[in-house]
Image (cartoon, grey):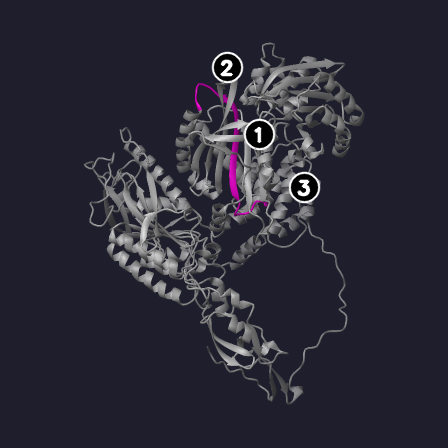
Amino acid sequence: KMIMPIKASESGKITHNLSPGSVISAGDLLASLELKDPSKVKKILNFDGSLNIDSATLETDTKDQVKNILAGYSGDADASAAGLIEGVSDADAASAIITEALSEFIRVENLFAGKLKDDVVRDLTKANIDSLDIVIAENQAHQHLSQRASLVLALLRQVGTFSDRFGTSDMSDDLKTSLKSLAEMKGKMYGEIALAADEIIRQSEVASFDSRVAELKSQLTDSSANLELISKSATLSAGVDLLTALFSDEDIAVRKNAVEVYIRRVYRAHRVEDINVDDTGGVITCTWSFSFADVEVSDSVTRLGMLKVVSSYDSIADDLPAMLEDFGGKLGDSSADNGPIHVLHIASTSDAVANVDSIESAVVAQQAKLNELKIRLVNTLVPVAGKDPLYYSFPQCEGYREDALRRNMRPTFHHLLELSRLTENFSLERIPAIGRNVQIYVGAEKTAKPARGGPPQVVFVRGISHSTGLVTPVGARRFLVAGLDELERAQANSKVNMQSSSRIFLHSLIELENTTPEEVAFAFKGIIGLLKSQLATRLLKLRVDEIEVKVRIASIGEDGKPLVQSLRLVASSMEGEWLKPAAYIEKPDPVTGVTSEYCSIDRDGEVCLLDPYTTSNVVQTKRSIARRVGSTYAYDFLGLMEVGLIEEWSEYIASLGDTDVTMPSNLFSSQELIENESGDLVLGSQRIGTNKNGMVAWQVNMKTPEYPKGRDVILIANDVTVQSGSFGVEEDEIYYKASVYARENKLPRVYIACNAGARIGLFDELKSKINIKFVDPENPSKGFEYLYLSDDDYNALPEGAVIANKVDDGYALSDIIGTNHGIGVENLQGSGKIAGETSRAYDEIFTLSYVTGRSVGIGAYLVRLGQRVIQMKQGPIILTGFSALNKLLGREVYNSQDQLGGPQIMYPNGVTHETVEDDQEGVASILKWLSFVPKNVGALPASRDSADPVDRPVEWRPTPTPYDPRLMMSGTADMGGFFDKGSFKEFLSGWGKSVIVGRGRLGGIPMGAIAVETRLVDKVVPADPADPNSRE
């Protein structure tokens, strides 16, 4: 509180607008002064005349317009981009002009990409100390990114017109380089630009449409060609749609072969029993009978398919009845009542734009006949000159109206990708994908209750594969990396939010031979563990919560005939454990082909219904909350630690070279520390996601290279999904007891911090009952006298809920206690308790803290009192938020939490020992640090075997010129240093730069090291934004 005199230079009558004690803000009118002599002040009046200024048209060159927009000024992006190459006569000149504009955009954004704005401004200021206008210009350009991005997108659209404008799609090497730079830009703000640039690059690298069709035609005209083998070829994946361009070829043999290969390929997952292609009068008719290959022959339902190739869809209304009559003749008598099971395909040879509405009207008009013939799907194919064809599907379940979800989708894709499982619980929207056999959908959950920020979102990547080797480590990695690449591209799409979950599904159409489901399932579990360790960073970044692979195993059915057995391999996080593997044998419905039940291989034939993809359960919702604050769900850290252990063992075994050392089984196990009825912590477990306490703790057992038989560690973590991870009385008790447990058992203690500080709760039931006694009811800005409750409301409250005094209006409130324990100052008592416990723990045992997301208030104190700190770059350590400080200071001083406690603050000042990019790297650093620590207090050092001989000479030598003293300890690639090769790790490198501290191993034994930096070092003390007089 402060008293500030406000003096007026003239005398007069003062009228107060606010009463004493009022809360004031900047710009509030406190009082007005009626002057004794009004002539002393010249009043400002509104101008009521007219401005006589001649209008003028500003002529600006198009290039200058583009430069102005790129500099951050407003302008018409589309018109400027179009005018930039207007009148340019060749592609090279156009490429040079566009490259110049794109290069300027890239130059500016590269200054800011992946960096904190404060750091960028500081670096720019140092580099341009004599010309600060450059710093202002660069910042102005970056601040108007959206306008500049619109210009870049408009320029990229102009690049797409090169073929029509100049007769060639060739681009200069400089333009290709600029496009690659744009495609590699990371971040949501560059998403549309990266996608557009990537699409142009991909199109430029694909051979021309005509050359690809010619190559395919040569295969079909080969006299020794086996059409069935061609249809199963993995190289046909990109060419199956090209087959449709040969439906109108002059060579009748080519036309017939193209149709047959097309049908065999599209129905690859089915048992095609016979196929006949007839060309009468230039009209091709293909008929085939088929059934589901994963259904016993004796139980299968035989279906009929027919493909008609017509010249155009102009007369489809007249042609369709004749087609259906022909279909009925091919079908013959069918008395079996299996519902709609047959399919009708119609393909046009004309690339004229087809009217989808007229096709739909013609199909719907024949609905009665279609139902009579039991036709399940009518699919139409429309060729597009020089491009892949368009597909339109009219399923019986939609009343033979077009299903927009199936548009431009091959006829069997809907079944192979199991899209019907998605549509029950999700509203799907398809977004562009890279692969021709891959589709990506953004699914919004169908919920009855509106959700803040919109319904939960899931990104589905679904594809089919004709490649072999999927169940090998190399093949599985290739598939998963391709799926992650698709997801990476999808994340740049503006329709995908940053909290969306991701699920990957692959249907492999290759039949595996000479193996069993049990063998494949066993191999999958080993492969998924390996892939989790190798790709953990990307899996976490892209929020992958489920990986599904459907494989087909060639076997013999009970009737002695060939049968394809479907096996579903799943790695799912839906139940809590991160990407837990499982395998199921599927049993499809003979009529629909949809899996009706599956049996878990691990549960001895337990039969379960295969439900549609469920909406977010409790675990998924909590996972989304944790991601929103930039962290990982507390229980998922257990999975990350297991993955980190696998990676640690893999690196260790590789470092030993030729060795008999193998990775132990059951590397990681955990038991949760939970309170029993008497309040003591005991080892046990609870269903993931059911905890009501915002603090969780485990005793984990890890088999490390130093302790292959296992070591115990106490892990304590904030659950940020419970009341934002805030500290209440119950959370303090769990933390305190878990830390005491670690001290009593002399075990290392690791704390994962992601919290909101001490909890200040609300007595919600009281809010609607509070009344205000204003000083002047007509003018609330003058303040109030007290808050009060009516007599009835006061008497209805439990005794002790509030402290109030009787007044004329009711009861004036002086204190609000509440009815629940743990919403007031009692939480601060718990904060002091756990702070003292953390100090004791640091004195007696090994303590290590990892900050992820954020750590506030008491959370920041605990981290500092634990001394050893690993900080994620998006995990500020702060006492209070920047917005609260801005309000206190009365102006916008700080613009982010990082200015208060980000790595750029905590790393140079010695609070943070090490910084990491993400949680997987953070867990790896935790494990690396623990590898230097004994398993408990008083135990022998945590040593491990080393392939680097302890008696070898130290080959690296200091040089006469200034050198890096770290090399003396770590060595170089060709000269060994003091410690075992690859074992030295520096800590606190941002603080006290003239001294180097770290840890390494000598003969496998851990050691600490201190060295002196003899070279010149820089120390940057940033300016304090709150002090205008401070300078860097």
Q: Let me know if residue 251 is in the magenta part.
A: no
- The residues colored magenta run 494-516
Q: Answer yes or no: do the residues labelled 2 and 1 have beta carbons within 8 Å?
A: no
Residue found 77% across the figure and 68% down from its top? 52
Q: Residue at x 68, y 35 (%)?
A: 403
The residue tagged 2 is 560
Labelled disc at residue 156: none
Report the label total.
3
Label 1 belongs to which residue? Answer: 594
Where, by quadrant of the figure, is residue 945 drawn?
A: top left
| SS under mark 1 | loop
The spot of residue 46 in percent (x, y) is 71, 74
Instruction: Identify whether 655 is placed above or below 998.
Output: above
Q: Nearer the viewer, mark 2 or mark 3?
A: 2
Assess disc 2: are there few (<14), some (14-19) or many (≥20) residues with their C-alpha within 10 Å of its C-alpha: few
Q: Which residue type carries mark 3?
A: Ile
Say whether disc 2 or disc 3 marks the residue closer to the N-terminus.
3
Residue name at image x 60 percent, y 12 percent: 222
Q: Position of residue 758 (x, y in %)?
A: 41, 62
Instruction: Give the percent coordinates (x, y) of residue 23.
Output: 53, 75
**Considering only vertical position in the picture, is 467 above or below 428?**
above
Q: Say left or right for 225 vs 984.
A: right
Residue 496 included in the magenta stretch of the image: yes
Residue 740, x across and y down, in percent: 28, 56
Q: CA distance from mark 2 to mark 3?
A: 70 Å
Q: Earlier in the sequence, mark 2 or mark 1?
A: 2
**Which amino acid is tagged 2?**
Gly
| Badge 1 density bin: few <14, some 14–19, many ≥20, Cα 10 Å | some
Q: Which residue is mark 3?
A: 85
